[in-house]
Amino acid sequence: MGKTSNAAKQRWNSKKYTQVKVYVKPEIAAAFKTACAAAGNSMAGELSRFMADYAAVAVANHDVGIKTERTDSVSTTKMRRKTVRSIVRLLEQVRDAEERFINKAPENLQSAPIYENAGYYLSVMDDVIEQLGEIY
């Protein structure tokens, strides 16, 4: 079986997908890339899921006659609860990725700052998830 050229892959991708460019601060991009790698997920896959979740909320808002502008997307209690549940699910995914990172870290990295930070982030995310659960 022959190797597919990059041009052929790009043609196939352009027929099946739409390219979206996002500009973010370098530290946000680095943290996102690290979290995706730790979770074993692609950045494109994670961004696609985030976009799909947001689109679902926007469509739901439109269906009940609420403007889909960002400021109005959580104007009802039902939508706020749904949004908080969605945020909690995302935080749980990030927390689980941090936990996997901690569990898989080799002994020589366990004294490194990145390992210590992962433990701190895990603790903070657990607290935030718990507090959001208490609110809604």
Image: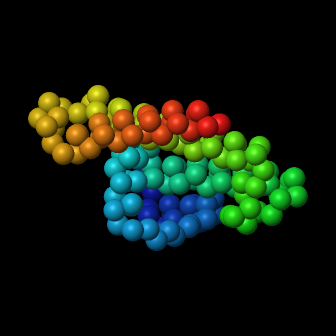
Residue 28 higher or lower than 90, as above or below: below
Asked whether residue 97 appears in the rendered view, the answer is: no
Residue shown at 52%/36% (left/top)? 131
> Image quarter for residue 109?
top left
Position of residue 40 measured from the top left corner of the image (x, y, whole percent): 40, 40
Which scheme is used to colour this image of the protein?
Answer: rainbow
* Residue at the far left in the pictured view: 108
> Image quarter for residue 25?
bottom left
Label count reads 0
**Is residue 40 rendered to the left or right of residue 45?**
left
Residue shown at 35%/32% (left/top)? 100
Residue shown at 88%/58% (left/top)? 65
**Is residue 118 rendered to the left or right of residue 47?**
left
Residue 53 higher or lower than 126, as above or below: below
In depth, the one of 60 and 1 nearer the eye is 60
Residue shown at 73%/66% (left/top)? 69
Position of residue 106 measured from the top left corner of the image (x, y, whole percent): 18, 32
Position of residue 99 measured from the top left corner of the image (x, y, whole percent): 36, 32
Quarter of the image for the C terminus: give it.
Answer: top right
**Is residue 3 rendered to the left or right of residue 48?**
left
In depth, the one of 57 and 124 nearer the eye is 124
Position of residue 70 measured from the top left corner of the image (x, y, whole percent): 68, 64
> Image quarter for residue 15?
bottom right
